[in-house]
Amino acid sequence: MAASKRRRILIVALSLIGIGAHIGEGLAQPPLRTLRQLERRFEEILRRPEFATTRWGILVESLDRRMVLIQREADQLFTPASNMKLYTTAAALVRLGPNFRFRTSVYAQARPDERGHVEGDVILYGRGDPNLSTRTLVGGYLTPFFDLADQLVRAGVREIFGDVVGDESYFVGPRLGVGWEWDDLQWYYGAEVSALSVDDNFVDVILLPGKRPGDPVQVILSPPSSYVTILPGVVTVAEGTPQRIEIERGLQDNVVEIRGAMPRDGLGYRAAVAVHHPALYAATLFREALLRRGIRVHGRAVAADWKVRRERPLDLRRMVELAAVESIPLSEEIRALNKISQNLHAEILLRVLGAEVKGEGSDEKGLEVIREFLQEIGARTSGVRVRDGSGLSRLNLVTPATTVDLLRFMSRHEHGAIYRESLPIAGVDGTLERRMRGTPAEGNVRAKTGTLAYTFTLSGYVTTARGEQLVFSFMANHHTGEATSVLAALNELCAVLAAFAGP
């Protein structure tokens, strides 16, 4: 857990600080006007001593002239990390369309009788909406579930004589991706995947110091819920004492054990901890919303997955939809997904691709859609292996060439502008918000980042000083040195391309 925690903190920290080493040095040189000069500048950066054992894959191509400007091991296989999201969102945008919406429904066997009674279970049926969230400033806590509960009230429901069932059977297969590391699974970026997800399937655990040394720290769970149990074991210590916090959530429960010490003058601590069995969590929150809206519920909150429905099939055509909410359009969803590199959303989208295109909401059917899509667009796929939708799996293997083929195709597609605008902008927003500031790349480069331990990638679009449109893919694997050095190099490569004044 400690290694995973360190990696999580490192990734967050790097996204919040500017990575500027070597940039000024690169821009101080005379403008590059020939391809040979551009090649030499790239080699100078990649041959620095800190990259002696780093594997680099590079491909830079002109979209205007359809010619290669720079390449280095462009056809070799690399771990893409979150560059995998480029593939998932492109396939979804092309196959589902920008106006596709996710629908979450509430079903019952029949409408309420004249007394407002509903006999039997009420089913909260999820179809993969990644943006069901109680974390909103509009409407307060439990907003989407209050919306559904209010619709039930308007439909005449006053009392439910059955369970509240969180149904996630729209998805088939395990809730975890192939090749995910176990020590990622208790954190938000390794959250379980469900067709019925809420709050990105994690809760915030916030710790604040007590008033005096020896006092227990204050523990805040956001959003508050009885679904997660906190076992606090952190005490307040004297000012100036180093802070030490350890958090552990069992992989098959929602018991969060916290140990350590927090100085009295400390600023506090926040951890985003994934919840186990998210469909049951959603059902619990929905039942709570029903009670708050005055609907009596005699049953419990329970969940049903594809295995349950294999034994007890659910025929929605024979049921009554009492309430429903629809998501934002896909065009807005992929913007949120790519800007902040949201793993859960990418995995949900992968399974929705399988459900909508192949008739089965599994990761394998979603991957089948992506593979067929790459073949149809003529991408170079020799040896390529895609195993999840987010890039969290270390079993993904792609090439810079495949990635450039994908980006080139999307630049000319009818939805290409939506796709391009979903990518982080250097120095402006998303995971590139604090990178490349003060360079020609700022406000220019639109690219998807990728980060795993020893893996750093960046692929996207840039315009040169003379207005030429370029597409690029940079992949660094096996980098065991400082993360700041490789991120600075990626920034500098982008700045060099943006400043290129060649023909």
Image (tube, rainbow, N blue to C red):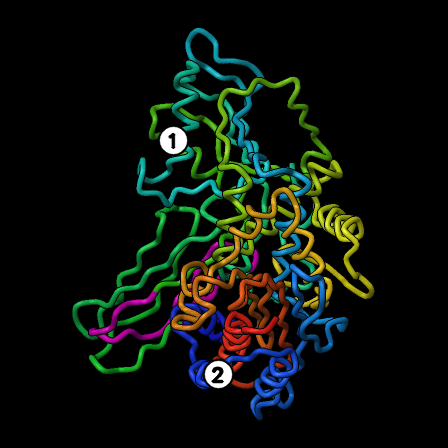
Indicate which disc residue 319 carries: none
Q: Position of residue 181 (x, y in %)?
A: 62, 67
The residue sitting at 44% across, 6% down in the picture is 114
Image quadrant holding the C terminus, namely bottom right
Q: Position of residue 131 (x, y in %)?
A: 48, 42
Rendered view: 299 above or below 242: above
Q: Which residue is mark 1?
A: 146
Q: Is residue 444 magenta?
A: no
Q: Which range is magenta? A: 246-269
What amino acid is at disc 2? Gly
Extreme residue toward the top, this view: 114
Q: Is residue 1 visible?
A: no
354 or 68, which is in the foreground?
Answer: 68
Q: Residues within 10 Å of mark 1 (few under 14, many from 20)?
A: many
Mark 2 vs mark 1, CA separation in Å: 55 Å
The residue sitting at 43% across, 70% down in the picture is 435
Secondary element at tag 1 = helix
The residue sitting at 81% across, 66% down in the picture is 383
Indicate which disc residue 26 carries: 2
Q: Mark 2, mark 1: which one is toward the viewer?
A: 2
